[in-house]
Image: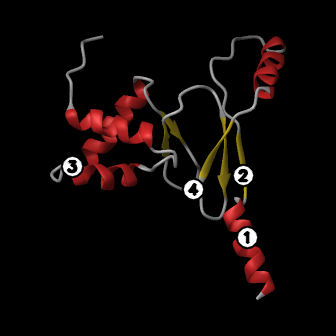
Amino acid sequence: MATLKYSRQRECIREYVQKCKEHPTADQVYAEIKREFPNISLGTVYRNLSLLVELGEIAKISTGNSPDRFDCNTKPHSHFICTHCHCIQDVENNEFDCMVKKVAANIDGRITDQTTTFYGLCNDCLNEKELLKSS
């Protein structure tokens, strides 16, 4: 693979995703990066996010009906996605490692990656729904 030329824009995108704990969308990254680089295009942000995912520096989370999100945590872990506000929370649980080992022992092949996603309502949305019920 050829050496990748340094890009201030790409570095800024990488740093933003790595500092952001909210699993931003490409549009959110674009809005933030545009402050420092007013002439940057949304396409440039998308291309750099894709490249950073390909390089393993960030991870892409496909959420189904809402836009893809980006994660600074590239280690295997699971996510909880709120079906109301679409926030994403990391789920750290060592039991998944045991589950992957058990599954691996029962398949004819090798597991190279796993993704587990939980769906439900986050506490903020649960509290909001409770407030609406009591009104």
What is the CA distance from the residue labelled 3 to the residue labelled 2?
35 Å
Q: Nearer the viewer, residue 96 or 115?
A: 96
The residue indicated by pointer 3 is: 36
| Mark 3 or mark 1: whose residue is earlier in sequence | 3
Q: Residue reaching furthest front?
A: 19
What is the CA distance from the residue labelled 1 to the residue labelled 2?
17 Å
Q: Nearer the viewer, residue 106 or 55?
A: 55
Give the image quarter of residue 54.
top left
Tell us which disc is closer to us: 4 or 2. Answer: 2
For image coordinates 65% across by 64% down, the residue present is 84
| Mark 1 or mark 4: whose residue is earlier in sequence | 4
Callout 1 crowding tier (Cα within 10 Å): few <14, some 14–19, many ≥20:
few
Tell us which disc is closer to us: 3 or 2. Answer: 3
Callouts 3 and 4 close, C-beta under 8 Å: no
The residue indicated by pointer 1 is: 127
Q: Amino acid at mark 1?
A: Asn
Query: Is the residue 104 above or below the residue 95 in the image?
Result: above
Residue 119 has which mark?
A: 2
Residue 74 has which mark?
A: none
SS of the residue under disc 2: strand
Q: Amino acid at mark 3?
A: Glu
For image coordinates 82% across by 12% down, the residue present is 105
The answer to whether 42 appears left or right of 131 in the picture is left
Q: Nearer the viewer, residue 65 or 96?
A: 96
Picture coordinates of residue 51, whole percent (x, y):
35, 30
| Mark 3 or mark 4: whose residue is earlier in sequence | 3
What is the CA distance from the residue labelled 3 to the residue labelled 1?
37 Å
Picture coordinates of residue 83, whole percent (x, y):
67, 60
| Mark 1 or mark 2: whose residue is earlier in sequence | 2
